[in-house]
Amino acid sequence: MTDVVLPQRGTPLFLASGSPRRAELLTQVGARFTRLPAPGVDETPLPDESPEQYVIRLARAKAGAGDGLRTSPGAVLGADTAVVLEARILGKPVDDDDALAMIDALCAREHRVLSGVCVLHQGEARTAMSTTRVRFRALTAAQRRAYVARGEGRDKAGAYGIQGLGAALVASLAGSYSGVVGLPLEQTLPLLEWAGVPYGISVPAE
């Protein structure tokens, strides 16, 4: 475990994710947490599983795996994000050729970004999900190749990261920006409140 800074009051939070982006979003809103090792969860979609079912299932699985790793009481947060073009889930690219094929497919089209969140506390799991519609610009082939060559999307669903240079690919967005980054704060913060996890604007119960 690293970055062990627990809240002085309230329920301690454990983040079951190796994603620096999720950690940055929690830090942004003033939540203190302990990072657990990235859960070794099989991310292969199940037969006939919808994208919505997929992200919720993986978020629950990651929270459950993290719950088995914590060594002290607290709530565990797991999350998963998927880029969906029509009904096809675009995972993390296996190489740059795969990344370029994804960027080519997304170019000048609208896709959905689904982010599932699960908070597990005292044996009870609660989940939520955001759906964000993103449209890519009509990029030239040279622009698409240049983005892939930068390597930014190699570890990201859909082969791009909107919080970095990938912002240059986007024409419009409707929904949760933080959900596209990897952790929809609009859905996550109510789950933290339910579990009693404090963050930047938490008010102690009277």
Image (cartoon, helix red, strand yellow):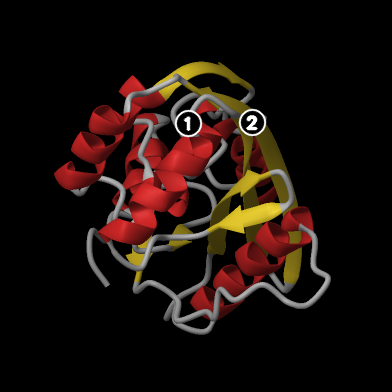
* Residue 6, percent from left and from top: 35, 55
Tell me where residue 40 sits by quadrant.
Answer: bottom left
- Camera-near label (1 vs 2) is 1
Q: Is residue 73 above or below residue 161?
A: below
Count numbered badges in the picture: 2
Q: Amino acid at mark 1?
A: Cys
Residue 59 falls left or right of residue 163:
right
Residue plotted at (71% across, 63% down) = 54
Q: Residue at x 45, y 19 (%)?
A: 137
Helix, strand or loop under label 2: strand
Q: Is residue 156 visible?
A: no
The residue drawn where x is 30% and y is 35% is 144
Q: Nearer the viewer, residue 7 or 46?
A: 46
Between the residue at mark 1 and the residue at mark 2, the CA separation in whole angstroms equals 17 Å
Name the element at disc 1. Answer: loop
Q: Can you tell which mark lies on residue 107? A: 1
Q: Above or below — where is 138 with respect to 18?
A: above
Q: Furthest-front residue in view?
A: 141
Quarter of the image with the N terminus in it: bottom left
Q: Residue furthest left?
A: 150
Place residue 146 in its image quadrant: top left
Which residue is disc 2 drawn over? 132
Q: Specify the farthest residue to the top.
A: 172
- Given residues 159 and 141, the one toward you in this image is 141
Q: Is residue 57 left or right of residue 173?
A: right
Report crowding for label 2: few under 14, some 14 to 19, many 20 or more residues within 10 A (C-alpha): some
Q: Is residue 64 above or below residue 77?
A: below
x and y, in percent, of residue 119 in the image:
64, 58
Look at label 2 and name its amino acid. Thr
Residues packed near mark 1 inside 10 Å, few (<14), some (14 to 19) or many (20 plus) = some
Residue 28, x across and y down, in percent = 36, 31
